[in-house]
Image (cartoon, rainbow, N blue to C red):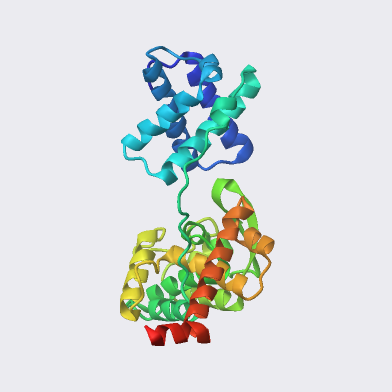
Amino acid sequence: MSLALSDALRDALSTWLDHLSALEGAAENTLRAYRTDVAGFLGFLAAHGGESIGPARLGRVTQTDMRAWMAHERSRGTQARSLARNLSAVKSFTRWLAEREGFDPTAILAARSPKFQRKLPRPLSEDAAREVIGQIGTQPREEWIAARDAAVVTLLYGCGLRISEALGLTGAASPLPETLRILGKGGKERVVPTLPVARRAVADYVRLCPFPVADEPGAALFRGARGGPLNPRLISRAMESARAGLGLPATATPHALRHSFATHLLAAGGDLRAIQELLGHASLSTTQTYTAVDTARLMEIYDRAHPRAATVQSKG
């Protein structure tokens, strides 16, 4: 952090991050990103004004200062999506500090976030998801490794788990119960029902695994070839091989199976709030992204199948 920042401002930033960690359960990666974002903004203010700054300086920030900072970030190649995240962190810190210090944060809080096109998740079709799981279950030469990889991707698609959550399971999860308690991002816990196919896949893996995973409740459930915790990169490689064999696009990643879980549930009439709980999203707006995916897919089908569209295509 810039040496032009006062000790009081440094302490305030550290205290805010501690607050996010202790009271809101923010993940370590999130805290690092917030520290970088806010420190970058404060460092800019110090350099821009040519002075050491403390908490009171944030109360004197003007709209001109905000425009100058955002222009500076763009000149450094910061994309709109990243700049929006930076601004969000700065606003959050400023709002918190203003309540403690009693200054007016209006100029900072009123700054408009840059517009950007949100990337929609790229789920697999239901057929493709099933084919991927089947392909992965036959790729490795060793039967237990094939069963392991198939069990992991079945949990991603059948339960909507993140790969870190699936690989974070311990031997205590075997045999797989009808519901799993998952500790997700930010330490948030959720309960996820497990389908019979997922329970069978994990049971098949445990039965074939040469390591006594069921007898070691605190050790990793999914093991590598030498018995250590399974590296997520190995599942990514399994997906790469599967999509190459099936002719699927590069977007067919392990995380795409989680997207597929949500999209297919929504298409089948699933409740958005329930899907939010199953995925462990902190905000419903994150889950609502899948409604856009479903709408986009319906429009593609409409464009291909509607008689009027077909007539236009034939005339062309």
Q: Is residue 275 above or below residue 54?
A: below
Of the pair 221 and 289, the residue shown nearer to us: 289
Q: Is residue 204 left or right of residue 75?
A: right
In the rendered image, the residue lying farthest to the front is 315
Q: Residue at the spot x=37%, y=16% of the render?
A: 3
Where is residue 140? Give x, y as percent.
Answer: 33, 76
Q: Is residue 218 above or below residue 294?
A: above
Of the pair 249 and 63, the residue shown nearer to us: 63
Tell me which corner region of the image, top left, top right, bottom left or bottom right, holds residue 160: bottom right
Q: Confirm whether residue 122 shows in the render.
A: yes
Q: Residue at the spot x=65%, y=18% of the render?
A: 102
Where is residue 162? Give x, y as percent.
Answer: 50, 60
Q: Residue at the spot x=61%, y=21% of the render?
A: 104
Which quadrant of the rendered structure holds the N terminus?
top left
Q: Confirm whether residue 155 shows in the render.
A: no
Of the pair 96 and 58, the residue shown nearer to us: 58
Q: Is residue 184 above or below residue 303?
A: above
Where is residue 68? Give x, y as percent.
Answer: 41, 27
Where is residue 158? Give x, y as percent.
Answer: 55, 72
Q: Is residue 61 above or below residue 288?
A: above
Count of labels in the image: 0
Which quadrant of the rendered structure holds the C terminus?
bottom left
Of the pair 136 and 248, the residue shown nearer to us: 248
